[in-house]
Image (cartoon, rainbow, N blue to C red):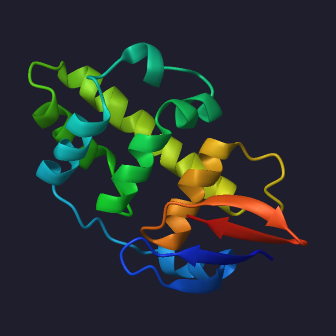
């Protein structure tokens, strides 16, 4: 079991928790954003929908390509879905093909699902840095942290 020390970005306070304690809480988190909010994040973080970046066959590469965007997206809504991301992509990038927007949305939801599955991994020794960042963003509810081992326990630092 991992014990983490997180520094919350808004208050600066430290809190300790375990990944297992948040797995039940994340099971039924609802979508809290609308397409306008997500479109704003897309315009800031992405330079259009580049198919060579999101149509990669490997999920690790997909998460690495969109790590910063996924972390910012999880700040806006903890549980994005395909319809929300499709609508947001259409609003963010005018003139985008509906099929490309839907494909992008499906791939981003697949990346988040992949990270959610990796979050349940107990050791995390083989987890890439990008996946670890997205997993921590899911677990800490608004904390962007980088993990490192220190004295047998994982510590998350801002």
Viewer-side residue, 36 vs 143 = 143
Question: Of all residues shown, which one is farthest toward the top?
Answer: 52
> Where does residue 100 sit, x and y in percent of width and height?
28, 21
Does the rendering let one see residue 121?
Answer: no
Q: Quadrant of the C terminus?
A: bottom right
Question: Along the horizontal axis of the image, is 23 left or right of 90?
Answer: right
The residue that appears at 42% across and 68% down in the rendered structure is 142
Q: What is the count of numbered marks? A: 0
> Where does residue 11 sit, x and y in percent of width and height?
39, 81
Question: Along the horizontal axis of the image, is 149 left or right of 63?
Answer: right
The residue that appears at 34% across and 37% down in the rendered structure is 105
Does the rendering let one see residue 130?
Answer: yes
In the figure, 21 relative to 61: above or below?
A: below
Residue 103, quarter of picture: top left
In the figure, 97 relative to 130: above or below?
A: above
The residue that appears at 81% across and 77% down in the rendered structure is 1
Question: Of all residues shown, which one is farthest toward the front?
Answer: 12
In the figure, 109 relative to 147: above or below?
A: above
In the figure, 118 relative to 40: above or below?
A: below
The residue that appears at 64% across and 52% down in the rendered structure is 132
Question: Of all residues shown, which one is farthest toward the right?
Answer: 152
Viewer-side residue, 86 vs 143 = 143
> Where does residue 61 sit, x and y in percent of width and height?
60, 28
Residue 62, quarter of picture: top right
């Amino acid at each position: 079991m991992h014990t983490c020390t997180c520094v919350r970005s808004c208050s600066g306070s430290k809190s300790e928790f375990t990944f297992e304690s948040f797995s039940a809480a994340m099971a039924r988190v609802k979508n809290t954003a609308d397409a306008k909010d997500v479109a704003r994040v897309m315009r800031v973080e992405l330079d259009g929908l580049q198919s060579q970046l999101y149509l990669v066959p490997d999920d690790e590469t997909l998460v690495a390509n969109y790590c910063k965007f996924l972390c910012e997206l999880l700040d806006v809504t903890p549980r994005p879905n395909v319809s929300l991301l499709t609508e947001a992509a259409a609003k963010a990038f005018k003139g985008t093909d509906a099929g490309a927007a839907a494909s992008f949305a499906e791939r981003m939801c697949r990346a988040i699902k992949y990270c959610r599955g990796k979050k349940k991994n107990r050791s995390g020794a083989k987890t890439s840095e990008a996946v670890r960042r997205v997993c921590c963003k899911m677990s800490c509810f608004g904390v962007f942290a980088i993990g490192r081992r220190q004295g047998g326990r994982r510590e998350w630092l801002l």
